[in-house]
Amino acid sequence: MISSIAAVFNDNANVQNIAKAMLADPAVRKSLTSEVFENRPLKIVAGSVPETAWKRSSASPDSIEVYVDFGDAKFATQPKLFTSITGHSNHRFLLGVTSIYEPTNTGFHVIVNGDGCSIDLANQEKWQLNWFAISAE
């Protein structure tokens, strides 16, 4: 139940606010109180991956990727995952921001691409991948 959420956040206030805002949305609350989560406390872990973590991807010449490791959260099963990207500019043109690859109970990959997408541009524009994971525990 939403009233019995166990939350674990890092120090990033923006990520905390995003998670709180999503939980305030009636549609999100409804999905979280479905049979999967009913009568079980929720574990929520959120974080932000800095712009310096992006690596070149083999998916295409204009692709970069990042791995999110939340193994310290010790999820028993693979949680539901949500992502977004923040930065100074140009991140609105990226494709794949919410596409999650190889999800497990310890982490996942995100691959983004777009014209001119590069590690240098990600660093210059300070593209950070924000994420949160939710699971009934």
Image (spheres, rainbow, N blue to C red):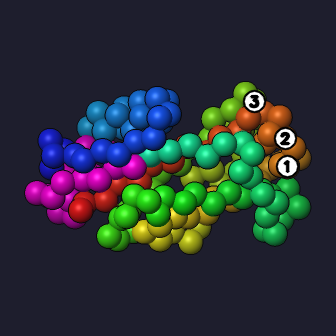
Magenta highlight range: 28-45
- Does residue 61 lie above or below 49 as drawn? below
Question: Could you tell me if residue 4 is visible in this image?
Answer: yes
Residue type at mark 2 is: Leu
Q: Residue at x 20, y 59 (%)?
A: 37
Confirm whether the magenta stretch covers residue 89: no
Name the disc covering residue 121, or none. Answer: 2
- Does residue 5 lie above or below 60 as drawn? above
| Residue on which disc 3 sits | 89
- The 10 Å Cα crowd at callout 1, few under 14, some 14 to 19, many 20 or more, is many
Q: Please state which of residues 122 and 70 is positioned toward the viewer in this rendering.
A: 70
Q: Residue at x 17, y 63 (%)?
A: 35
Q: Residue at x 85, y 49 (%)?
A: 118
Q: Please state which of residues 90 and 10 is positioned toward the viewer in this rendering.
A: 10
Residue 49: percent from the left, percent from the top? 61, 46
Name the disc covering residue 118, or none. Answer: 1
Q: Secondary structure at mark 1?
A: loop
Circles 1 and 2: CB atoms closer than 8 Å: yes
